[in-house]
Amino acid sequence: MKQNEQKSMTEWNHVSSEDNIITKRIEPSRIEVLSSFTLAGISTVTTNEAERGQDGKIGMLFEKFHCQNIGKKLGVHIQEDGHYSCYFHYEQGDAGLYEVMVSVHIKEELQLQKQDMIKVFTVPTAKYAVFVTERGPIIEMIQRTWADIWQWSQQPGNNRAYTGDFEYYSKDINPEDGQAEIYISIK
């Protein structure tokens, strides 16, 4: 994945002739097919409901990943610079439990030794709807883009596969004025 200076997702307004209601239609920046690749990092299990409340775990997972220099510990095994937040093992789509892993892209032949807390997940080959966040405070931009993705996934014809979705952050991302990409696996 290469971090792109590109336009964020496409939006347009549609005016219903019946009620004069304006609806916002969200579209991904692009559709892309990716081959499988392997990630290694630390993970937790959570729900969207927990993340919206005070029981959220994702923020603490990112903090632990960076404070404990997990990416640096895997440095010799890294295939590509940058880091990922990968969502997988969905139990009921976006309504139930799922696993989230803050990670780095590693070489496939990784032999983890003395890395008890490190988890490995192979993101399967899939077709992705790619959403590019707006530039700004990265946590806020990611949350705003996910809200748009949930709206997009409710639109007719947008069928999520739930095989492994991920956020990609370039190695030099500025947390105060950054931009990231969110890859949503689709059918």
Image (tube, helix red, strand yellow):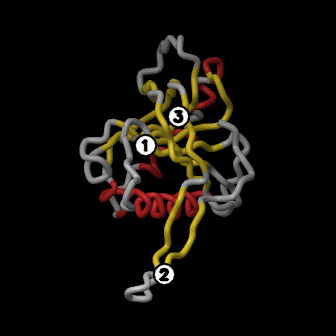
Which mark is nearer the camera, 1 or 2?
2
Where residue 38 sits in the image (x, y, percent)?
Answer: 51, 24
What's under tag 3, amino acid-wise? Ser
At mark 2, the secondary structure is strand
Q: Is residue 73 above or below residue 13?
A: above
Which mark is nearer the camera, 1 or 3?
1
At mark 3, the secondary structure is strand
The quadrant where residue 83 appears: top right
- Residue sitting at 59 percent across and 25 percent down? 73
The residue under label 3 is 103
Which mark is nearer the camera, 3 or 2?
2
Cα–Cα gap, marks 1 and 3: 22 Å
Cα–Cα gap, marks 1 and 2: 27 Å
Label 1 or label 2, whichever comes before in sequence order: 2
Where residue 54 sits in the image (x, y, percent)?
Answer: 35, 62
Q: In terms of depth relative to the viewer, which is nearer, 58 or 161? A: 161
Cα–Cα gap, marks 3 and 2: 42 Å
What's under tag 2, amino acid-wise? Val
Where residue 169 sits in the image (x, y, percent)?
Answer: 62, 44
Asked if residue 47 can be seen in this view, the reply is yes
Label 1 or label 3, whichever comes before in sequence order: 3
- Residue sitting at 31 percent across and 41 percent down? 90
The residue under label 1 is 186
Asked if residue 67 can be seen in this view, the reply is no
The residue under label 2 is 15
Label 3 or label 2, whichever comes before in sequence order: 2
Where residue 77 sits in the image (x, y, percent)?
Answer: 61, 18
Q: In terms of depth relative to the viewer, which is nearer, 144 or 55? A: 144
Which label is found at residue 90?
A: none
Q: Quadrant of the C terminus?
A: top left
